[in-house]
Image (cartoon, grey):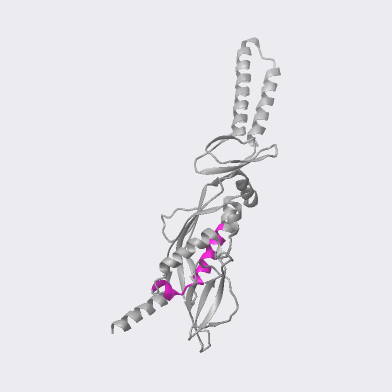
Amino acid sequence: MGSLFLMAVLFVSTLVVAVIKFPKEAARLKKIVVFGLVGTAATIGMLGAFSYNDAGYQKHVRTIFGTESAVLDTGWYFEGWGRSTTWPKFITIANTLDPSANGSEVNPPYRVRLADNWTGDVTQSTRFGIPNDTELFLTMAQTFRTPERLISTTLMPGVNASIDSVANMFTMEEYYSGGQRDQFKSEFSNTIMFGRAQVRQISLNQAGGIIQSARARANDDDATDNSGDVGDTDVRRLIMQKILDENGEVIRVEHDYLQYGIVVNQAILEGIDPDDEYELQINDRKQASSR
């Protein structure tokens, strides 16, 4: 818009110079000035009308004519003296203490509480791909306006909620000593990509029979076994069992970002760093076992 205004000013200046009478000896200088102003105005106008989209980015373009468009490929495009918002093709949300980590949003490890109430710090990296379809991209861009708003209102909360939901399915003991570390990481990846799985909480008595209990919903991909004491001498443990549809598929609650065509290209949970108290407890167990 500023370039269009400057172009108009230069054209007006050209007209003013053109109507002013110069001495004959300065007539040639007048022509040079006029042509220079016209050329400058045209150049500035063209620069305001066109812009360049670099590799790895997409543009949401709004022209002064009231039109909107999406630029998905690298190269020059018509900006129409309007505004363009730059969107990266990929957005990475990371939780880490690595000072060399790169990403659109890099935060410290995420504090999470597992099913047995032990807490730990999760290190993870999730990479989202924004839609490469014109209609989906425009809908996303119109809804969130900027990448920063998309990250803060949808992507980062979705990652945090996924970590919390999966953590609710496991105990710290299962993660470290029960051989379910890989399963925990797989559950996180599936939850981020496909949505939270609906589960029911089942109480098992010491004979292995099911005690009816209220249904709860959380994230998981398989039935996950959670040992716990619920205050009833007949109850041995609780398990979270996934709810399946009539075709035997897990019923999932999709994340909001999936409806905009945003896909998860990568979801890596590197690990959980437990509280110092838990590590001390583990060391005490090792010492007791060795004795």
Q: Is residue 109 visible?
A: no
Of residues 82 and 245, the one drawn nearer to the viewer in this rendering: 245
Of residues 42 and 221, the one drawn nearer to the viewer in this rendering: 221
Of residues 79 and 223, the one drawn nearer to the viewer in this rendering: 223
Is 174 colored magenta in this rendering? yes
Residue 101: % across, % down: 43, 55
Q: How many marks?
A: 0
Q: Is residue 257 above or below residue 231?
A: above
Residue 125: % across, % down: 46, 58
For the stretch drawn in magenta, what is the main secondary structure? Answer: helix
Is 233 colored magenta in this rendering? no
Of residues 180 and 223, the one drawn nearer to the viewer in this rendering: 223
Question: Quadrant of the image for the N terminus?
Answer: top right
Residue 115: % across, % down: 50, 75
Residue 239 left/right relative to 286: right
Q: Which residue is outermost to the left?
A: 291
Q: Which residue is outermost to the top?
A: 24
Q: Is residue 202 above or below residue 79?
A: below
Residue 128: % across, % down: 52, 53
Image point (53%, 73%), residue name: 241
Question: Quadrant of the image for the C terminus?
Answer: bottom left
Residue 275 left/right relative to 42: left
Magenta segment boundaries in residue numbering: 155-176
Q: Is residue 24 visible?
A: yes
Q: Which residue is outermost to the bottom?
A: 233
Residue 150: name its quadrant: bottom right
